[in-house]
Amino acid sequence: MSQGSSATSLDDGIVATAESCLASVGQAREAIHGVIFGQEKVVDLALVTILAGGHGLLVGLPGLAKTKLVETLGTVLGLDARRVQFTPDLMPSDILGTEILDEDADRRRSFRFVKGPVFTQLLMADEINRASPRTQSALLQAMQENFVSVAGERHDLPRPFHVLATQNPIEQEGTYPLPEAQLDRFLLEIDVGYPDRAAERRILIETTGIADQGAKAVMSTDALLTAQRLVRRLPVGEAVVDAILDLVRSARPDSGDPLVKGKLMWGPGPRASQALTLAARARALIEGRVAPSIADVKALAEPVLKHRMALSYAARADGDTVEGLIAKLAEKL
């Protein structure tokens, strides 16, 4: 088979798969919006995170439906979901699992591994910054490698495996900031704000009656895995690739845009470029397209880069914000 015919068959394969995926993803998106009111952007970004095969960090005040969103995502996408409430006394074994000593009828003893809640397809790490750094780091290997090591033994996690963590943006006692290495494992940082008046009115009416509308399964695990594979096969144009590279490289303190010179302590690495590429593809799929555009890159610039950058002391004193710098860099694309 010639090179040209191979390319044609590949394109035909993508189109054929995309037709079914676009329909199922659209139905899933509609189903989630039917349960989570007034958080359309948050829902879409969470869906982008899952379709891109990544993990998300939900940042917002209590009572803004973060837990409800994760539960709804699990139901609609056909995923096994579990929730862990992170507290200062939470231990790594409470998440990963532990080995216990068993004794059989013949009094022979052996160790047996009891799996922790991390062995699920969608894990909600609620108030992740309430736990100690030691417990936070227990998720690092799981989020990056899709397996955990306990007592020198490897234990593979289910596929797909996603972590959606929440944290409160207000500085409070008893919180431990996430280390940069763990923040970088999150594909997106998703800000959860207050709903507008119309959405809050709908929430008030539809969730305080006798029957509360619940989510229903729309996709299966196999269908989701197919969509995730499709995301990685979607073509990315040279102009979009250049826009991603320009944006990420411009946000670095030493070699970046003159706009950020002296304003950043650190900036995004190559993992940010990977995250932006995957997220742009996933956003295109959600919007009913089979190729990302520069508009997708601009729309995802803040959630991809925000947690991968830190302002210098001088920049904070001058009133600069990470969001403001990212917006100015994105405008240049």
Image: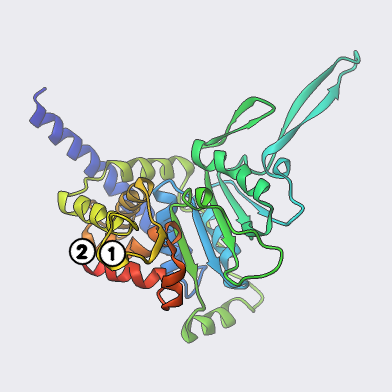
Q: CA–CA distance between discs 1 and 2?
A: 8 Å
Who's the residue at 30% across and 51% down the image?
281
Q: Is residue 103 above or below residue 275?
A: above
Residue 203 image position (x, y, % from top left): 55, 78
Q: Is residue 310 above or below residue 232?
A: below
Residue 5 image position (x, y, % from top left): 10, 30
Who's the residue at 28% across and 71% down the image?
328
Mark 1 lies on residue? 298
For mark 1, give the secondary structure: helix
Q: Amino acid at mark 2?
A: Leu
Judge left or right: residue 267 versus residue 76: left
Quadrant location of residue 311?
bottom left
Closest to the camera, between mark 1 and mark 2, is 2
The 10 Å Cα crowd at callout 2, few under 14, some 14 to 19, many 20 or more, is some
For mark 2, give the secondary structure: loop
Q: Is residue 1 above or below residue 131?
A: above
Nearer to the camera, 222 or 264: 264
Judge left or right: residue 111 versus residue 136: right
In the picture, which quadrant includes the N terminus?
Answer: top left
In the picture, which quadrant includes the C terminus?
Answer: bottom left
Q: In this rendering, does residue 29 appear at all?
A: no
Q: Are marks 1 and 2 in contact (CB under 8 Å)?
A: yes
Who's the residue at 59% across and 44% down the image?
139
Who's the residue at 69% across and 40% down the image?
116
Count of marks, rendered view: 2
Mark 2 lies on residue? 333
Q: Amino acid at mark 1?
A: Lys
Reading the chain from its start, which is encountered first: label 1 or label 2? 1
